[in-house]
Image (cartoon, rainbow, N blue to C red):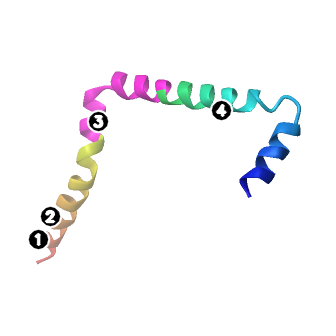
Amino acid sequence: MLKFIKHNMETIIGIDAYPIIALLIFFFFFVGLAIWVFTYKKETVREISRLPLEDDEQKNEQNHIKE
């Protein structure tokens, strides 16, 4: 099975550039993502991390008010 695929890939002209292009795309994507994560404001991360807890606290307060 691999022989058939390998033979077909060898006959396509210019296919050797695609793995290099794919590697560069993924590399720059992950480097950009790492830069974005490390430069993100810590205050914003804390606010976002509290959102699920605040929602539960608001529901609990509403339930206590109704009772």
* Cα distance between the residues tagged 4 and 2: 52 Å
Three-letter residue code for mark 2: Glu
The residue lying at 26 percent from left, 54 percent from top is: 52
Q: Residues within 10 Å of mark 2 (few under 14, many from 20)?
A: few
Q: Is residue 23 left or right of residue 46?
A: right
Between tags 1 and 3, which lies in front? 3
The answer to whether residue 62 is above or below residue 18 is below
* Cα distance between the residues tagged 3 and 4: 31 Å
* Residue that carries the numbered disc 2 in the rendered image: 61
Q: Earlier in the sequence, mark 3 or mark 4?
A: 4
Percent position (x, y) of residue 1?
A: 74, 58
Q: Residues within 10 Å of mark 4 (few under 14, many from 20)?
A: few
Three-letter residue code for mark 4: Ala
Q: Residue furthest bottom?
A: 67
Between tags 3 and 2, which lies in front? 3
Query: Which secondary structure dominates the residues rendered in magenta?
Result: helix
* Residue that carries the numbered disc 1 in the rendered image: 64
Number of numbered callouts drawn: 4
Percent position (x, y) of residue 42?
A: 26, 28
* Residue that carries the numbered disc 3 in the rendered image: 45
The residue lying at 13 percent from left, 70 percent from top is: 65
Q: Secondary structure at mark 4?
A: helix
Q: Earlier in the sequence, mark 4 or mark 2?
A: 4
